[in-house]
Image (tube, coloured by chain):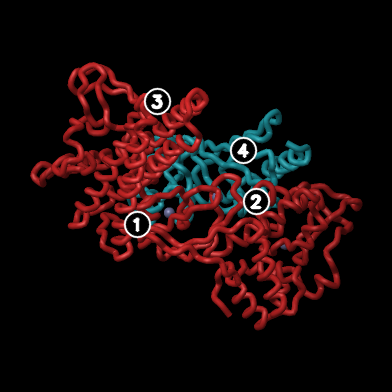
């Protein structure tokens, strides 16, 4: 990783700590600055309220010319998070063809929070969950809350 | 104006269609592709009164849809030029690097009055190093060329080639040019690159996406590769593209359930001694008790190929047996496994057939040096091997096809054709396992069997293609 990229990550970390979105905590290790651990509380107005989620944000070597990679380490029932051991989230600005180098991590964090409040079923990674979200909201909410109880307490 | 075909000025003879399952196509080499591109640029350049260089940019920007470009150009010239970065001000003020006061690069956070910076007309300014890095990531890393956007957040302006010229170094500029040539083929609906690794040929074919439920357009590249013009996968006749997609997805999803036994040993159903399968042929003979059976269904071989025996058909149990949900789901799994195992077995057998052929060929070459056999005389083996590969490829996909086939009066004809081809293939495959010194005397027999395999394959493919074209097949899914 270039010194420029390191400088930018450092700067972004400082920006994030100055302006961390509510309900989030970033664990940053200067020895390993390309991997951030993010602790996220399910937003109050969302069905994930009361849940505590652990996420990993990994910065590729080409950062900021390629987007950071976000993965949920805590299982979550969500149309935009892959239901496997990777728990990856890949939509909007997190996609290589939509990411622009001036985009910032703070914006990514806000995107994640917004998606917990309102999932994007039209750009889903889990089609069956997206379908349930669209067609049987009650069942979806029941499952999502169930998973919060089971995995995110 | 003629409609949007890739090479309208070309008078190449289109190969006449021989069989119902064959599709017309033309293969073009890299030079021909470049030449046709230049011809179109020249033609449009004359119509628009723009120099060829600008016309090329306009055409690429319009995804090589020249009718639409000409219409739009006539209607709103300024707008079209502007969006491709070719407007008046761009010509009078060509793009250049600048140093600006109180500048900070929003990508690397560097600042200072000595920093070279660049911005297109949209005004999104970044330091030249970041701009360069961005372009090289797009071009080298992601293979993009004609539609790279400004790095500015939310900006959709396309980076034009003049801007690119002053920013990147020669190696990236070369790659950029290659990619631009590639977009020509990618943007044309009737052209497709041969997907074989390192192949530079493109194929022209008139089959459109909407035709794909009725036709399986297998094309044959000059490099030797057979592929589907519809989806670029390896030849998958007789199954239509959409069934292939469904089938591959199902196999992937059910890979754990299917748990295909790729083990090369089974027990003889009569004496239980272990039997190893080392060729592709499914006709097994137990070394110990000489019992002959089918590797696939473990049934007695002598009964194969008779009109009342079915190794290839899945026998549905009568309704009374499969009444409750559990029984139904078990039956549907059994049905899938029946077809999947046969599909996978032909894939596996094709590999084994090839292995054994390569071994045989090696021995034949050795034999040539000790005997009077010439190179020409051993060519029948190569022909037999090739026919086997092709027939197994077809057979493999007949099982995916059959899985989605609903029963009607045509199904039995299909299953008979499948069975006949399968028998022909196993009979030929078997010959490869004969001792090497017998091969030469079997030459005539082997050539006959090769011709018979090819004939059975044509019969099967013609039947499926004709019925697909007239919509006679009933599938249990929608295409
Ligand atoms: Zn910069
Ligand atoms: Zn811009
Ligand atoms: Zn090729
Ligand atoms: Zn296809």
Q: Chain of mark 3?
A: B
Write the residue at 30% across / 53% down: B459
State the CA–CA distance, disc 2 to disc 1.
39 Å
Residue at the spot of label 1: A135
User: Which residue lies under the disc numbered 4?
Assistant: A58
The answer to which of B335 and B357 lies nearer the viewer is: B357
- Residue B2 is situated, as x and y percent measured from the top left of the image, at 56, 77
- Which disc number belongs to residue B436? 3
> In which quadrant will I find the C terminus of chain B?
bottom left
Label 2 in the same subunit as label 3: yes
Q: Residues within 10 Å of mark 4 (few under 14, many from 20)?
A: some
Q: Whole-Å distance between the Cαs marked 3 and 4?
A: 59 Å
Question: How far from the left and from the top, in percent, is residue B289?
Answer: 20, 18
Is residue B156 something one can see in this rendering? yes
Residue that label 2 marks: B143
In the picture as drawn, the residue positioned furthest to the bottom comes out as: B75
- Badge 3 marks a residue whose secondary structure is helix
- Tell me the red chain: B
The hue in which chain A appears in the rendered picture of the protein:
cyan
The quadrant in which the N terminus of chain B is found is bottom right
- The subunit letter for the residue under badge 1 reads A
């Amino acid at each position: 990783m270039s010194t420029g990229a390191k400088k930018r990550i450092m700067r972004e970390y400082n920006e994030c700590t100055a302006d961390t979105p509510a309900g989030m905590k970033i664990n940053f290790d200067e020895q390993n600055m390309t991997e951030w651990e993010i602790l996220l509380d399910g937003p109050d107005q969302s069905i994930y309220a009361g849940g505590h989620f652990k996420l990993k944000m990994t910065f590729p070597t080409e950062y900021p010319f390629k987007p950071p990679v976000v993965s949920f380490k805590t299982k979550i029932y969500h149309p935009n998070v892959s239901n496997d051991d990777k728990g990856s989230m890949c939509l909007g600005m997190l996609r290589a063809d939509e990411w622009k180098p001036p985009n910032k991590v703070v914006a990514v964090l806000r995107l994640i929070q917004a998606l917990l409040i309102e999932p994007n079923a039209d750009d889903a990674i889990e089609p069956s969950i997206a379908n349930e979200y669209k067609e049987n909201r009650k069942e979806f909410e029941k499952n999502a809350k169930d998973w919060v109880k089971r995995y995110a307490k | 104006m003629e409609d949007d075909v890739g090479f309208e000025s070309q008078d190449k003879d289109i190969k006449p269609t021989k069989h119902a399952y064959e599709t017309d196509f033309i293969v073009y080499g890299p030079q021909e592709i470049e030449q046709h591109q230049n011809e179109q640029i020249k033609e449009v350049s004359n119509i628009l009164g723009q120099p060829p260089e600008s016309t090329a940019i306009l055409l690429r920007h319009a995804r090589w849809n020249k009718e639409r470009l000409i219409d739009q150009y006539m209607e709103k010239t300024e707008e079209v030029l502007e969006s491709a970065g070719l407007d008046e001000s761009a010509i009078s003020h060509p793009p250049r690097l600048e140093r600006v006061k109180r500048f900070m690069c929003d990508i690397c956070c560097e600042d200072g009055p000595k920093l070279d910076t660049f911005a297109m007309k949209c005004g999104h300014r970044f330091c030249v190093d970041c701009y360069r890095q961005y372009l090289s990531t797009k071009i080298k890393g992601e293979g993009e060329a004609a539609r790279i956007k400004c790095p500015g957040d939310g900006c959709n302006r396309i980076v034009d080639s003049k801007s690119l010229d002053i920013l990147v170094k020669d190696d990236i500029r070369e790659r950029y040019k290659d990619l631009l040539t590639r977009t020509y083929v990618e943007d044309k609906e009737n052209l497709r690159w041969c997907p074989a690794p390192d192949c530079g040929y493109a194929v022209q074919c008139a089959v459109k996406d909407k035709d794909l439920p009725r036709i399986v357009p297998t094309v044959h590249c000059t490099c030797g590769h057979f592929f589907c013009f519809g989806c670029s996968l390896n030849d998958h006749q007789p199954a239509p593209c959409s069934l292939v997609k469904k089938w591959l997805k199902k196999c992937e999803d059910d890979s754990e359930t299917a748990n295909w036994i790729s083990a090369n040993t089974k027990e003889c159903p009569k004496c239980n001694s272990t039997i190893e399968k080392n060729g592709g042929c499914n006709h097994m003979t137990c070394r110990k008790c000489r019992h002959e059976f089918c590797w696939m269904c473990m049934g007695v071989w002598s009964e194969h190929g008779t009109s009342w025996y079915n190794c290839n058909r899945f026998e549905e149990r009568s309704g009374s047996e499969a009444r409750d949900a559990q029984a139904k789901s078990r039956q549907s799994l059994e049905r899938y496994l029946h077809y999947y195992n046969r599909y996978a077995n032909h894939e596996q057998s094709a590999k084994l057939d090839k292995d054994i052929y390569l071994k045989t060929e090696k021995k034949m070459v050795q034999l040539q040096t000790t005997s009077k056999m010439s190179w020409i005389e051993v060519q029948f083996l190569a022909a037999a091997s090739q026919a086997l590969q092709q027939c197994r490829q077809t057979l493999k996909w007949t099982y995916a096809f059959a899985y989605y086939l609903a029963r009607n009066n045509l199904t039995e004809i299909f299953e008979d054709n499948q069975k006949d081809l399968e028998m022909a293939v196993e009979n030929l495959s078997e010959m490869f396992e004969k001792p090497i010194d017998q091969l030469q005397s079997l030459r005539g027999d082997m050539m006959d069997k090769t011709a018979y395999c090819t004939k059975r394959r044509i019969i099967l493919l013609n039947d499926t293609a004709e019925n697909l074209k007239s919509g006679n097949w009933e599938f249990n899914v929608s295409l």
